[in-house]
Image: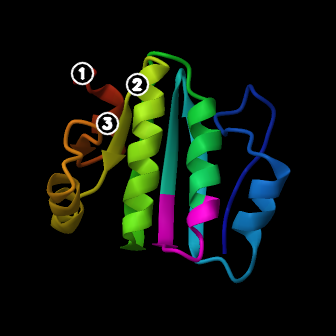
Amino acid sequence: MSLVIAEPMSSPHLMLSTRLVYELADPHSTLRTTTDRSGPAVLINAGGEIDACNEHTWRRLVSEAASGVTAPGPFVVDVTGLDFMGCCAFAVLADAARRCRERGFELRLVSREAIVARIVDACGLNGLLPIYPTADAALAAAARW
């Protein structure tokens, strides 16, 4: 089950496209998310699984959420609720991180799983995907680039 909240802009929640809301609400979806705004920053909390079956939804979610960030951001993606994160999920984040930098803010990944840090390191993405232990730490950190 997915939870996506779309309310007026004065709300801390980020407005997402109707198409994306329907994709996330699909009863067969293994991806659960919430997307919130904190000042100029946007935060995605992801749960469930990201694999080839929902890569297009993940890509759309990350893209739409990133478009809601105002520089200096940041854009925080908390994956601590994920049970599985396929390689495609990391590729989407790396692409988004490059676009975020072009727009003047940083994508920050939140995870306490050693495997996530090992994959980011093995793929040479340390400079693009800084990892923080909590969303609060990611929101509070100064830009690393």
Read off the residue under disc 1.
Answer: 145
**Of callouts 3 and 1, the N-terminal one:** 3
Q: Which residue is mark 2?
A: 101
Q: Tag 3: residue type?
A: Ala
Q: x%, y% of residue 144?
A: 22, 24
Q: Is residue 21 above or below residue 83?
A: above
- Residue for point 26% across, 26% down: 141
* Marks 3/1: CA–CA distance: 14 Å
Check whether the beta carbons of the residues at disc 2 and disc 1 lie within 8 A of each other. Answer: yes
- Looking at the rendered structure, the secondary structure element under dot 2 is helix
**Amino acid type, mark 2:** Arg
Q: Is residue 103 above or below residue 35?
A: above
Classify mark 2: residues with Cα within 10 Å, few (<14), some (14-19) or many (20+). Answer: some
Q: Which residue is mark 3?
A: 138
The residue located at (48%, 31%) in the rendering is 99
Residue placed most toward the observer, 142 or 54: 54
Between discs 2 and 1, the one toward the N terminus: 2
Q: Nearer the viewer, residue 124 or 145?
A: 124
Above or below — where is 70 with respect to 60? above
Q: Where does the image place residue 60, in percent across and percent down from the top left?
A: 64, 51
Residue extending farthest right: 18
In whole angstroms, how far apart are the C-alphas of marks 2 and 3? Answer: 16 Å
Marks 3 and 1: which is nearer the front?
1
Extreme residue toward the bottom, this view: 28
Q: Is residue 108 visible?
A: yes
Q: Which residues are magenta?
A: 46-57
Between the residue at mark 2 and the residue at mark 1, the CA separation in whole angstroms equals: 9 Å
Of circles 2 and 3, the one toward us is 2
